[in-house]
Image (spheres, rainbow, N blue to C red):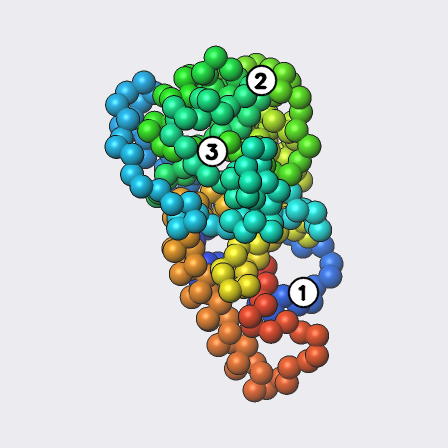
């Protein structure tokens, strides 16, 4: 019997079914999950948002942008290995070269300032409130290669930014990078690839594939069967976090980007509502079933989102 895929359009965490909210997974056997595809599709919205700003056109007015106010702190794990981390805590990240503190890698700069900082092979992430982050590969001579409107294109960094602030994103993923020459070659070889020939779902997956060369960033690069090996840990503050599980890195990145697009406040509101409902259910269950030692408390809950595709 093959996998059965059901396409749903859940818009928030409260609507998404989860397993035991205490984090105790009672089913130790292999699981075939359901594909939960959020209706606000990544590429579709990115095209709508920048449809009025073609490359080389007028840039929107720069708005004040505070990464700590708008961005979601999170970590990504493959089994027990941390493969991605965005944190504003100096204890969690290594200082970037030339920076005194650990948060320098999340500082944002104007496109013109970035030109003085970028080296061939660097990844650049452009950020703006209420928009998906846009990733590019710097290839030298003020130019970048990136996935834009379902096509891999070569453009000037200042045009690709569309007025957004950006940061060098080399430290977010913790994979071992390829040499700068190979990263640039990977990017340039894909220029002109578009539509059905594309192997990446969004600009982040494309840029990360160029730098790290891992098939996990490609569409269908992993088999989605069995237990979910990827975990997205979202920090809620006050030493609390919420963890979602995925069967592929591609699916996880799409959810991470959705969180970036809706912003930190909206994500915390969604998760708070979800956790509150789960805690109320726990209290009802506690009346019938006393709490067992070793079982996680509500403040340490880890919900399991079956986010899998066949």
Q: Which image quadrant for residue 301?
A: bottom right
Which quadrant would the C terminus be assigned to in this image? Answer: top right
Mark 3 or 1, nearer chain start: 1
Q: Which mark is residue 25?
A: 1
Q: What residue is shown at x 47% (from left), y 42% (from top)?
A: 257
Mark 2 is surrounded, within 10 Å at the Cα level, by few (under 14), some (14 to 19) or many (20 or more) other residues, namely many
Vertical relation: 138 (above or below) 218: above
* Residue 7 visible, this orientation: no
Q: Nearer the viewer, residue 59 or 196?
A: 59
Measured from the top left, where is residue 37 in percent x and y? 48, 46
Nearest to the eye among marks 2 and 3: give it: 3
Vertical relation: 280 (above or below) 19: below
Vertical relation: 293 (above or below) 134: below
Nearest to the eye among marks 3 and 1: give it: 3
Q: What residue is shown at x 73% (from left), y 58% (from top)?
A: 29
Quick check: marks 3 and 1 in contact, CB under 8 Å?
A: no
Q: Nearer the viewer, residue 23 or 96?
A: 96
Quick check: marks 1 and 2 in contact, CB under 8 Å?
A: no
Q: Which mark is residue 184?
A: 2
């Amino acid at each position: 019997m093959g996998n059965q895929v059901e396409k749903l359009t859940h818009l928030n965490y409260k609507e998404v079914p989860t397993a035991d909210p205490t984090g105790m997974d009672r089913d130790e056997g292999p699981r075939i999950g359901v594909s939960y595809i959020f209706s606000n599709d990544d590429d579709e919205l990115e095209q709508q948002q920048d449809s009025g700003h073609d490359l080389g056109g007028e840039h929107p007015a720069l708005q004040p942008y505070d990464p700590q106010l708008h961005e979601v702190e999170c970590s990504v794990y493959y089994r027990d290995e941390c493969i991605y981390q965005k944190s504003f805590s100096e204890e969690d990240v290594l200082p970037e070269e030339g920076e005194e503190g650990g948060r320098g890698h999340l500082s944002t700069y104007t496109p013109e300032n970035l030109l003085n900082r970028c080296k061939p092979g660097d990844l650049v992430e452009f950020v703006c409130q209420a928009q998906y982050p846009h990733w590019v590969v710097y290839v030298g001579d003020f130019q970048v290669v990136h996935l834009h409107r379902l096509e891999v294109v070569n453009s000037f960094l200042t045009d690709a930014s569309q007025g957004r602030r950006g940061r060098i994103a080399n430290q977010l993923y913790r994979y071992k990078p390829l040499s700068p020459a190979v990263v640039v070659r990977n990017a340039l070889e894909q220029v002109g690839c578009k539509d059905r020939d594309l192997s990446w779902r969004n600009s982040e997956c494309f840029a990360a594939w160029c730098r790290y060369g891992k098939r996990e960033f490609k569409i269908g690069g992993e088999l989605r069967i069995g237990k979910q090996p990827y975990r997205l840990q979202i920090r809620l503050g006050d030493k609390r976090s919420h963890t979602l599980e995925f069967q592929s890195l591609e699916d996880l990145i799409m959810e991470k980007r959705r969180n970036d697009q809706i912003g930190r406040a909206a994500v915390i509101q969604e998760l708070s509502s979800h956790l509150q409902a789960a805690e109320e259910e726990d209290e009802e269950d506690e009346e019938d079933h006393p709490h067992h030692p070793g079982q996680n408390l509500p403040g340490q809950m880890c919900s399991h989102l079956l986010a899998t595709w066949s």
